[in-house]
Image: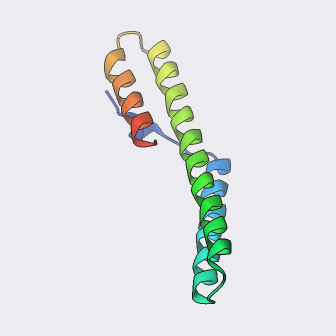
Amino acid sequence: MATLEEQTVYDKAVINRINRLQGQINGALKMIEEGKDCKDVVIQLSAAKSALNRTMNVIVSENLVQCVKETMNNPDEDTDELVKEAVELLNKSR
């Protein structure tokens, strides 16, 4: 049985989210280096945190869809193991 990690292909939207997230983090770092107001830095970091959480939710959702598809395509596959893996991933993302 191949694990889901071996089968995962990320779409362009997820990659774009990560690139924007990098920009937000770099922006926060620049603000800190320039001595910007604490409030502004926290707002920037909060936006990055929200973007990271949304990105993880997208990835976990896609993983769950993949689990369901794999189970439907391979009825003999160990469904319990796939569900366990998906739930563990969901828990890690929180």
At x 62%, y 83%, the residue is 30
Asked whether residue 78 is in view, the answer is: no
Residue in front for this viewpoint, 65 or 22: 22
Q: Residue furthest top?
A: 75
Residue in front for this viewpoint, 46 or 90: 46
Residue in front for this viewpoint, 39 or 54: 39
Q: Is residue 71 above or below residue 43?
A: above
Residue in front for this viewpoint, 4 or 19: 19
Q: Position of residue 7 (x, y in %)?
A: 45, 37
Q: Position of residue 15 (x, y in %)?
A: 61, 55
Q: Is residue 77 above or below residue 86?
A: above
Q: Is residue 74 above or below residue 21?
A: above
82 sits left or right of 13 in the view: left
79 sits left or right of 61 in the view: left
Q: Position of residue 8 (x, y in %)?
A: 48, 40
Q: Residue furthest bottom?
A: 34
At x 56%, y 45%, the residue is 10
At x 44%, y 16%, the residue is 71
4 sits left or right of 47 in the view: left
Q: Position of residue 59 (x, y in %)?
A: 54, 41
